[in-house]
Image: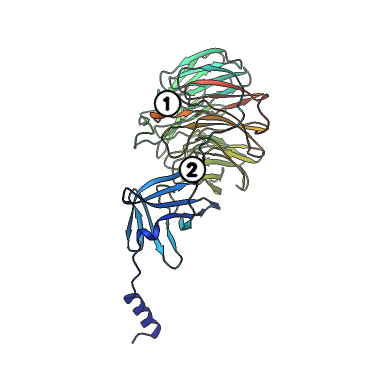
Amino acid sequence: MKSCAAAILFFATTTIAAVPLSFADLKGWWCAEPTHGGESSKVCVHFLEEDGKQAARLSLPAIGGHDVSIGIAEIDGQTVDFESLKFQLEYNDSRNTLRGVIPEAIAPIYKIPIEFTRAAALDKPASGAWNLPRAKVTWFYDTNSAVWAGLEHDAETDLIFVANDAGAVISLDRAGKQHWSFSTDQPIKARPSVIGPWLLVTSDSGFFYKLDKRTGREQWRARVDSGSPPRVPPTDPNSKWDRYGSSAIADATRVFVASRDKHLYALDIRTGAQLWRVSAGDIVTATPVLYRDLILFAAFDGKVTAVSAIDGKERWTYDAKLAVPGDLTVAGDRVYLGSRTYDLIALDAASGKELWKRYYWFSWIESPPVVRDGTVYTGSSDALGVFAFDATSGATRWKARVPGWAWSRPAVGDELIVVGTVGMGGYLGSRNGALVGIDRASGTLRWIHIEPPDQAVVEKRTEWGFAASPLIVGKHAYAADLRGRVYAIDLASAPSKTQ
């Protein structure tokens, strides 16, 4: 015979059915603030009738998304799901909440619980006018093709090197005068690297070039791509969004460069002869780093690997779970990297042990970290921000809101950080291409340089703005945009604070 308690429970569960949820119960706004990795972010769902249908809209304020359609709200008993987003929510009558797990489509890897409660309507954010003081442009030079590869400066010659999608490598003095140019005939997506008397350049031609930095004369070329997949534009559903390429690093006798053909190459710095190569699980666009006798590199399968600089033998591997597209950075005994899991990660460079993570809500981290005076600085993608963290603990120091995708490496000066952003028309929320100056101590935006695109660029959903990593040299910042122009910004006359 059942116990009294069991009998009561049996009776309750078999005779009292939950009242089915109706759309009238849901109409209006529901908001939540889920937390992961010590970071929280607001998420709102708006249920409303549209053209006689039970519609739903999603807002993610952290990335500027407001009231974006997620299709029809489909109700089954106490459960609601959405036509265009796998996001099942259970209604709790006693708490008047909707509970579920954030879908992988907007928060990959981690199963992050979320609970919505009724809320007031979320105000639509004002369109970003970015009413900041304008930077003073000293000069500009037109390379005649989009620039994705970051700029490089050589202290010995005081030359600035820029490379573009036409495959041209160009040297400029700091007055904007061209000294020489060299053609690789195919787009260059990786920053040229000055190493001693040489300029080392990787091109989508499949070759790696060693040039004399003073004259641009070719010393040798070596094939470092045995057949990589073609780059697919971001408008194609099969795109990997692999916008950049690996630059070169070197020790006394060897040059190291990673390739989209899923290999890391070691070449003789004198002759270009291949010394060894090691395979990766996917394409590699991140520039590797040297640490003691190790080369550390990362691929689009999320694997971060340390190999011997002498023979390429593996020492350790760390799994970041998703693609690591941006360059690695070593500072002291640590290596820092960004992942498409939305994590900025610090590892012990000798062992690969994870030391800390910081989570960027709803945003890939494509931007290579920069470490200076105990602080890590990175840009972001959809988070539309530049972040500063304590390099030892990962504690947040500040976040600066910026106009668009900050994919490139920030230029970090003594008092100022200069960051390029990329914009696109017809995207979720506002995205603007610009160059911004940020106070290094506080994260306050000081000035902006922005040149809005023409209507054709907006309508074609073409990326615009500053995708290449800028430079700070002396009292000037140098940056190149997706129209192909290199700009010199006078920092001495730049505003010291926002107005």
- Where residue 224 sits in the image (x, y, percent)? 42, 27
Label disc, if present, on residue 474 of the rendered structure: none
Judging by the rendered image, the residue that carries numbered circle 2 is: 63
For the C terminus, the image quarter is top right
Judging by the rendered image, the residue that carries numbered circle 1 is: 455
Which of 242 and 303 lies nearest the eye of the viewer?
242
Q: Residue at x 56, y 16 (%)?
A: 172
Crowd class of label 1 (few under 14; some 14 to 19; many from 20; radius 10 Å): few
Give the mark count. Answer: 2
Q: SS for tag 2?
A: helix
Amino acid at pointer 1: Gln
Instruction: State left or right for residue 145 relative to residue 448.
Output: left
Q: In the rendered view, tell whether residue 467 sits above or below residue 98.
A: above
Q: CA distance from mark 1 to mark 2?
A: 24 Å
Residue 493 falls in which quadrant of the image? Answer: top right
From the viewer's perspective, is the residue at label 1 or at label 2 nearer? Answer: 1
- Where residue 378 sits in the image (x, y, percent)? 56, 38
